[in-house]
Image: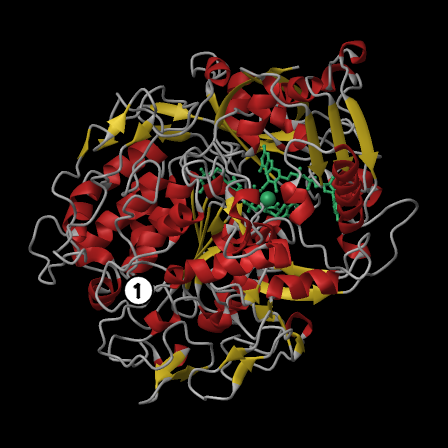
Amino acid sequence: MTNHWVDIKNANLIVVMGGNAAEAHPVGFRWAIEAKTRNKAKLLVIDPRFTRTASVADFYAPIRTGTDITLLSGVIRYLLETGKYNKEYTLAYTNAALLVHPDFKFEDGLFSGYDAEKRKYDKSTWAYQLDEKGMAKRDDTLSDPRCVINLLKQHVSRYTADVVANICGTPKEAFQAICEHLAETSAPDKTTSFLYALGWTQHSIGAQNIRTMAMIQLLLGNMGMAGGGINALRGHSNIQGLTDLGLLSTSLPGYMTMPSEKEPSLQAYLDKYTSKPLADGQMNYWQNYPKFFVSFMKAMWGDKATADNGWGYDWLPKWDKGYDVLQYFELMHQGKVNGYFCQGFNPVASFPNKNKIVESLSRLKFLVIMDPLVTETSTFWQNHGEQNDVDPAKIHTEVFRLPTTCFAEEDGSIVNSGRWLQWHWKGAEGPGQALTDPQILAGIFLKLKAMYAKEGGAFPDAINSLSWAYGDPHEPKPEELAKELNGKALADLPDPKNPGQFLAKKGELLPGFALLQADGSTASGCWIFAGSWTQAGNQMARRDNSDPSGLGNTLGWAWAWPANRRILYNRASCKPDGTPWDKKRTLIKWNGEKWVGVDVPDFKADEAPGSPMAPFIMQAEGLGRLFALDKMAEGPFPEHYEPFETPLGTNPLHPKVISNPAARLFKDDKAQLGQHQQFPYAATTYRLTEHFHYWTKHARLNAIIQPEQFVEIGEELAREKGIGHGDMVKVSSKRGYIKAKAVVTKRIKALQVNGQSVHHIGVPIHWGFEGLTKKGFIANTLTPFVGDANTQTPEFKSFLVNIEKA
Ligand SMILES: Nc1nc2c(c(=O)[nH]1)N[C@H]1C(S)=C(S)[C@@H](COP(=O)(O)OP(=O)(O)OC[C@H]3O[C@@H](n4cnc5c(=O)[nH]c(N)nc54)[C@H](O)[C@@H]3O)O[C@H]1N2
Ligand SMILES: Nc1nc2c(c(=O)[nH]1)N[C@H]1C(S)=C(S)[C@@H](COP(=O)(O)OP(=O)(O)OC[C@H]3O[C@@H](n4cnc5c(=O)[nH]c(N)nc54)[C@H](O)[C@@H]3O)O[C@H]1N2
Ligand SMILES: [Mo]
C-alpha cells in the first residue's frame, strides 16, 4: 500500500475490484465500513460474482474474468473526454506533458519493437524525447501530438462504453455509473481508494490491471492524498515482509535487484541500477543505490567485504533467468533439478496444474519440507485414489520432513499491507521436536560450512565468507536479526554540518537510511528497514495510538517503512505552491522554511515550493507515469489481452493478437491449454473466510462451519446442464478434473459477451487429501501453467472448464 489500512476511512469512494475484502480481509475491511459511516463514502464492487463484499456495497457491477483493463481503460477515456480529471495535478505531477519518442507506436494489438520469435519487445522506442543534456523534453501547452496525454487519449479512444459492454459483459448503465462515481473524486477535496488483491494479480495481464488503476488515481489527483493511493490488500500475514526482504527470485532486500550474468562486475551492476536524473534538479532515491547496496554487502559478508574485492560482489549469485515457481517447476519437470527445499509452502495444493507439480516432484532426488503440518506436498508420493492417483513404487524422491514452529510460537516482526512493522511476542512454545526456521537454517548452514572445511568443494567462498555474528550461532535470535536488518555504523560518522560532532558513533544502530554510506562504513541488511531498531530501542514494539489529526496517522504506533512515513508521495497532497489540495486532509505543508505535518514528509525537507523538484521521488523525472517507459514487459500503455484460455476464442479488439504477447508460456504447457469448443465455461478460483488456504484442513472447528468441497454455478447454467443444488458434479479442464457438490446460486449471472452468453464457474480453493477434516480434490488440478509477463504470477483467476453431473 502507498497508504495504510486505517487511512481507508478517509476515502469518499471505495472501489473493491479484483478482490473480495469482506471475505479475505474481514478485519481490515472495517475501515471501508468506517468510511461509509464517517464520510458517507460509497462502496462499489466490480466482480464476476456477487460477493460478500458486494452484499454490503452501494453498487455492484458484474465483469467477465480477465477483462478489467478494458473497463478501466474505458474509465480513462471517459475522464479524458469529459475533462473530469484534476488538470493541475496531472500537468504538474504526472508525465502527461512529456514528449514520447517519435518511433513509438501501437498497431493491431502490438507496440513498436515486437519480436514474435522471442515473445519479447525491443523497448528502445518506449522512451521520452531527450534534450542535449539528456533531460526529458516537455510541452506544457500539451499541443504537441507526442505529449504522453495526447498519445494516451488516442490509445484509449477505442474503449467506448459499447466496447466495454461487449468485452466485459458489464451493462452500459452500470459502466456509466462507475465512470460518474469515479469522476466525482477528481475534485481536490474528494478521494477514491481501490481495494484489490488476487482478482487483479492472478492473470497473464495482472500487473497491467493494477497499472491501469494507478493511472486513474494519477488523473484523479488521488496519489499522495489521505484516503487515496494504491492499496494492495496483501495475503499471508507477513507476505509484505517477504517481498521487502527480497525473497522474490530476482530481488535483493529493499527492492534492489539481484545481479544477473549481464552485470559481471560491480561497476556494471551499479551503473545499471543507479538512477540518473531525467529532469533538471530532480532528487531521486535510486541515485543512492550504491549506498544501499554496499551497506547490504557489509551486512552479508562483514569484514570480508572490502573495496578491493568489490564488497564481495563475486559471492552473490548471478541469475541467467528468473527462478520464479513456474520456471523452477518447469526445470524440475525436465529433470534438471536434484533437490528442492519447501519452507512454509505447499506447492502441490497451491501451484497451478497439480498433476504437473506432482510429476515434477517425482523427478527430484530429494525434497525437504519445513512445515509445522503435514501437507499434500510432503505426501505427494502416496496414492489417494482419484485425488492423487500416483504409483508410489515408481517414485524415488527421498523426502525429509523437518517440523517447524509457526508464527504464534516465536517473537518477531510482521509487516502488514500498510508497510507497518509490528513486533509481536510468542504465545506458546513450539510442541515436540519443532524448531524455529532460523534454528533449522542455521543448523544446515553450519553443517555445510564444516563440510566445505573438511572436504573442499567447487565454490566454498560464499558460504565461508558469510558473516554470522550471532550470540549462539545455532540460534540467531529475532532481536539480533532485526538489528542486523536495521543496520549500524562500522566507523564514526562525522556530521558534515557540525565539525567535531558525529551522526553516529562506531557500533551504534543507525537512526535511518539517510546515514548509509557507499564506502563500507555502514552495514544494513535492508535499507528500507533502517530506523526500525535504533539506539532509542525497538520502534516496531511501540504502541502509542494517539492520532492528533484524526486521519489515522498514528506515528507512535509500530514503525512504517520508509522512515516511519505513513503515506507515500505525500508531497503530492499539496499543490505546487505548497498549500494542501484539501485542508481537511492536511498531511504536510510548507511552513516557510520546511515541510511539516502529521506525517513524515516524503520530500527534501527544505526544498521550497516553486522549485522544479517534483513529488514522485522514486522516479528519474519525479513524475507519476501515465506512460510507463520500459518498465513493463508488454507495453507502456495497458491493452486488453484475453486470458490464455478465453471463452471467446478471439480478441474482439485485434483478432491477430489474442493474449498477452509477452507472457512466458512453456511449450508443453501450451499443448495443455484448452479451447472454448471443448471447455466452454470461464472458471475462477478464490478463498472463503472460514478457511485459511490449506492449513484449516487440520482444524475441525473450521470444518463445522464450512465442511464440504463445492463449486458455484448460476441458475441458468444449472438449468441448461440439468444440475440441481447439492448434486455431485465433475468439473474438468484440459489438465484434469475435480468432483464437488454444486451450489446453484443467483450470485453468478450469465454475461452477454461478443454475441455469446458466458457462464462463470466459481471454484473455492482449500480441499485436498491431507488433514483431519473431510477430504476433497485440489482445485489447482484445473488451473493453467501460464503467468503474468512481469511477475510470473499464475493465471489462477481465468481459465476454461467443462461441467457435468458426476
Ligand atoms: N479467510 C481467509 N483470508 C485470507 C486468505 C485465506 O486463505 N483465508 N488468504 C490470504 C491471501 S494469501 C491472499 S493473497 C488474500 C487474497 O485476497 P482476495 O484476492 O480478495 O481473495 P480471493 O478470494 O482470491 O478473491 C478474489 C476475488 O476476485 C474475483 N475475481 C476473479 N477474477 C476476477 C477478474 O478478472 N476481475 C475482477 N474484478 N475480479 C475477479 C473473484 O470472484 C473473487 O471474489 O486473502 C488473504 N486472506
Ligand atoms: N487456484 C488458486 N491457487 C492459488 C491461489 C488462488 O487464489 N487460486 N492463491 C495463491 C496465493 S495468493 C497464495 S499466498 C498461495 C498459498 O500457498 P501456500 O503458501 O503454499 O499455502 P499455505 O497453505 O498457506 O501454506 C503455507 C504453509 O506454511 C506453513 N507454516 C505456517 N507457519 C510456518 C512457519 O513459521 N514456518 C514454516 N516453515 N512453515 C509455516 C503452514 O503449515 C502451511 O503448510 O496459494 C496460491 N495458489
Ligand atoms: Mo497470497
Residue at 63 percent across and 15 percent down: it is: 805
- Which color scheme does this rendered protein use? secondary structure
Residue 537 coordinates in the image, percent (x, y): 68, 77
Give SS at disc 1: loop
Residue 302, visible in the rendered structure? yes
Q: In this view, does 213 lie above or below 31?
A: above
Residue at 39 percent across and 63 percent down: it is: 285
Q: Is the CB–ligand 1 distance for label 1 below 8 Å?
A: no
Residue 98 coordinates in the image, percent (x, y): 17, 55
Q: Is residue 372 above or below residue 386?
A: below
Q: In this view, does 754 lie to the left or right of 308?
A: left
- How many residues crowd mark 1 within 10 Å: few (<14), some (14–19), many (20+)? many
Which of the image's four quarters has the C terminus? top right
Q: Is residue 692 left or right of residue 490?
A: right
The residue at which mark 1 appears reads as 221
Residue 376, visible in the rendered structure? no
Seen from the viewer's position, the closer of residues 262 and 564 is 262
- Quadrant in which ligand 1 is drawn: top right
Name the amino acid type tagged 1: Gly
Residue 723 coordinates in the image, percent (x, y): 60, 20
Residue at 66 percent across and 17 percent down: it is: 359
Q: In this view, does 564 lie above or below 148?
A: below
Q: In this view, does 492 lie above or below 630?
A: below
Residue 481 coordinates in the image, percent (x, y): 69, 60
